Each structure stands twice: as structure tokens, then as C-alpha cells.
Amino acid sequence: MMESERLRWLRKNQSKLRVGKYHNLNEYNSNGETHGSNTGKRVVLPSSYVGSRKYMDQLYFDGMAICSYVGFPDLFITFTCNPNWPEIQSLLGSVHLKASDRPDIISRVFKMKFDELLSDLTKKSLLGKVLAYMYTIEFQKRGLPHAHILIFLHPSNKYPTPSDIDRIISAEIPDQDTNEELYNLVKTHMIHGPCGFANQSSPCMKDGKCSKYFPKQFQPETIVDQDGFLVYRRRDSGHTVLKNGIQVDNRNVVPYNAKLLTKYQAHINMEWCNQSTSIKYLFKYINKGYDRITAAIVPNDDGTSNQPQNIDEIKQYIDCRYVSPSEASWRIFSFPIHGRKPVVERLYFHCEGQNSVYYTDFDRINTVLEKPSVTESMFTSWFKANCKYPEAQNLTYSKFVSKFVYVKKKREWKPRQKGYTIGRLIWVPPITGELYYLRLMLKHVKGPRSYNDIKTVNNVKYDTFRDACFAMGFIGDDREFIAATKEANHWGSGQYLRLLFVHMLLSGSINRPRHVWSKTCHLLADGILYAQQRIANNRGIIFPIL
């Protein structure tokens, strides 16, 4: 299998690929250490590997960067492959095969359908002008491909009122006499179950109840309830369909858009996003990675061994992971599993002499240090661009990428000719010391030409970035720790924020812990975010039904 070979290559080459700091390599070279095998740290499973945990985490951070720039998403769409599409059946019918026998055909047809759907939404503005979007392709459940899509609409094309929402989202069975085609499509693709008392053996039934909370209650009008969640209109119109020998009504309809359902004739669940507190979970959901479960038999700990357990990220990634034939075909064809617009540029930075240097075990350190690319990085090239281009003087590092593009081969920045990019400074916690204070300065300093320029405030050059931050008024009275916690709240879970707070306490750098806690206790104290997410899920408001 291709993916196994790629993982095997990474495992076999772990001993060759090294990464260290330029400053550290200089020290080792001065001390007589000449070979790279004596320095650096191991890279296990990098974020560049498609589908890895780090890869999905970076996508989540990118999604939150888009969200912070253009606002909250407006629509959440789940598009599932239909194995009975005429394009698939016409190819299989002549040879008397089932759709599951030709996963390559399923992948190709779904890719074409998905591209057309994305074009309808983004280029043809079927639901309104789109400012941004992101999607992820998954293969859980039955193994058929399905896509989760988040749509960010232009302010002039949003759907703020219940009557506006009713124009694009329906949760009712249409009249069979006036619209027979749509009636049959809803019957085939958009009916949940049946489940509940009518069918206790349905896969969605857990402890005698539907895990998706169907059937819903009749609702005369679309409303936003007292908790701020949307309740779609489900009138008691008398329209019913016969599904698996059971008569069901509007209470079992999954929300859909009539135009999209008519054109694509597949399960297309459309939900209106109305809760800002659920956005973090929404981004986590579409970037959650593959479903898997791991079980292992391990010896009891008798307390005699204090050796730390080795962490094998490649093993963690592949253990108990199931790859369906459709997913295998998708990956063989090199179809993307994720996409977004606008592009998010991840901006790395480092203290002076602390840029990362990649080398092999067999490289001589003095040879590595002589390479031109070693002393230069994207970050240090930014200094040179600020000297060369006058317009760069008015841009911070994160805004710089909106006007310039980095040419990796030439290791230099050039003015951007087309397109638009959002810059995202890689987040580091306060316990990283000077690196954290450098990041704090980079959020405000425009057009510096050197590290000394970043340390200079009101024509006074300070010795450290922390002193410069203090002169700028960014820190003092633990305000930097409060700001760090609030910034991390934009993308971090409640558990992560509490862990961050503990690390800051252990570092001994917080002067007044109670003061920091009192300023951020609404973020740190409990799982408010996840409680609201669970409520949303329980109500069947946002999350897709497959």
C-alpha cells in the first residue's frame, strides 16, 4: 500500500534527518563535534504528512485564522456520495458489478461532483457571495466519500432572520402533487431513520433513544430558542413518506437546500451556523482526522521501572486505522483531502541565531554551516525586504504576506502580483521566554530591518525583547499572561487553557496568579464551551447526520 510505504520511508529515515539550531551547531563545531549524529533532535511524524495529527492541528489553526479575519462561518454543508448516480451505474451496469466493486469510479465521480458543487457555491454564488471557505474529505461510516464544507458569506448576503433562513434551508417534505421530483429526492436522501419506537433496531438508537434526537418536534415557524439555537420550521402539514415500511412525516427530515438536492441528487445536509461559541468545535470537527480505536494488552506496572515510555507517532497514526477502498483510490489519485480559501501563510520566526537547520547524520557540521541557506530564513529575508521595498515599512510581519510572496528557491520576498494571503504567526506560550516576547513585538512593529530595530522603542535600544515589550506597555502586572490566555482561547480547548495556566505557574514567571485567574476564570474554570457544544449536538442543530 502506498501510504504504508510512505510511513515506512519516514521510519527508515528517522536516523538520517536531523534538525538543530544554527547557534547550537556553531557551539558543537567549536567544541570539536564534527558529525551531525551527535546533535539535534528527531522528527517523528511531521505536519507535512497528509492526514497526520499535526497536519490536522495546523489546518484547525488555519481555519481559526480565517475565522478571526472574515468572521464566523454562515453555512455548514455535508455532501455524501450517492453510489446510484447515473454516471456510476452506467459504467457498472454493462459488466454487472456493484458500486463497491469499483472504488476508483466512485472516487472519480465524487471528485467531479464535489468540484462542481464547490464551483456553484464559490464562483457562481448560488447561495450568495462567498468571502472564504474550507472543506475536508472523509471516508468514515460506510466507506463512501463525503465532504464537510464551511462557507463564509459576504455581509450583504447573509441570512439573519428566520424568514431568510427558510428561503435556503427546508426541513419539510414537499407536496408530492406539485413537486414530485423533489418529493422523491427527499424521500430517498433526506429522511433520517426511521428510528425510535417504530424501529428500535436502527443503528442510531442508543439506550432506547435516537442519538441524533429524531424524531424532532413539530414547529410552526423557524425560531431561535432561549439558548440561542436555531429550531427549523417543521409544520404538521400532513405530508408523509413511506420509508422501510414505516410512515414518517416532517419530524424525520434532515435539513436540506432544494436547489442543491435537485441538482446533485444525493444526501446534502445544510445547517445554519448561529453560535459563535460552537465555532471552535465546528473547526475541530471537520479537522478531527480519521476514526479509529486502539486496544492493547500491557503488563502491570509493579513500580520497579521508572523508564519513560517511548512515543512513536507513526505507530500511533497507523494503529487500528482502517482504510476503505474508496479512500485508497482517492489517495492513489492524489486528490486533496482538504482545501481552503483564502490561503493561510504560517509565519515562523526565531531569535537571532536560533533558526532551524536541517541536515543528515553523515553531514560534517562545518560543511552544513557553510551552506548559504543555513544563515538565512524566511524571517531574516523579511528584514532584507523591509530595506528594499518602501511600502513594506508600513506592514507588520503578519500583514506583510498580503502584499509580498516568499520565493523559496531564491530565499527572498517579492511583491505579490495576484491573489490574497492571510498571515498567521505561529503561537508560542509565555514560558518560551524571549521567543514569546519577540512574537509580541512582531504583532506591532512595522518594517524592521534587523533584530535591533525590533528591540528599539522611542529611539532607545533595549537589551532584550522583554524589555522592549515592557517599554511598549505590553507587559507589566502580569498583563502578558492574561493576553496569552485570551489569545489561546480563540483556538484552544478549555483543557488546553488550563494546562497552559499550569505551565505558566510552574515557570514561576507569574507575579500574581490569583489576579491572572480572576481575569481569565471564565475561560479556565470549566468546560463552558464544550457544554454548549453538547447542547448543540443534542438538539441536532449543527452537526451532520450521515
Image: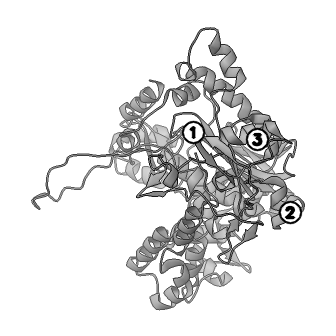
Query: Marks 3 and 2, how far apart in space?
Result: 33 Å
Q: Residues within 10 Å of mark 1 (few under 14, many from 20)?
A: few
Quadrant into which the N terminus falls: top left
Instruction: Please identify the quarter of the rendering in which residue 541 is found.
Output: bottom right
Percent x, y for residue 313? 38, 45
> Residue at the spot x=56%, y=33% of the render?
144
Residue 258: x and y in percent read: 80, 45
Q: Quadrant of the C terminus?
A: top right
* Circle 3 Cα neighbour tier, 10 Å, few/some/many (<14 / 14–19 / ≥20): many
Residue 379, by quadrant, is: bottom right
Residue at mark 1: 244
In the figure, 33 relative to 11: above or below? Answer: below
Q: List the residue tagged with mark 2.
A: 155
- Circles 1 and 3: CB distance less than 8 Å? no
Which mark identifies residue 93? none
Q: Residue furthest top?
A: 95
Please name the amino acid that badge 2 sits on: Pro
To which residue does mark 3 refer?
183
Q: Nearer the viewer, residue 257 or 52?
A: 257
Circle 2 — which element? helix
Q: Does label 1 or label 2 sit earlier along the sequence?
A: 2
Helix, strand or loop at mark 1: loop
Asked if residue 188 shows in the view, the reply is: yes
* Comes first in the chain, label 1 or label 3: 3
- In this rendering, the label closer to the viewer, 3 or 2: 3
Instruction: Say whether residue 245 is left or right of residue 5.
Output: right
Q: Residue at x 51, y 36 (%)?
A: 142
30 or 477: nearer the viewer: 477
Is 180 situated above or below 491? above
Q: Tell me what residue is drawn at x 41 percent, y 37 percent.
A: 364
Question: What SS does tag 3 mark?
Answer: helix
| Image position of 62 with respect to 95: above or below | below
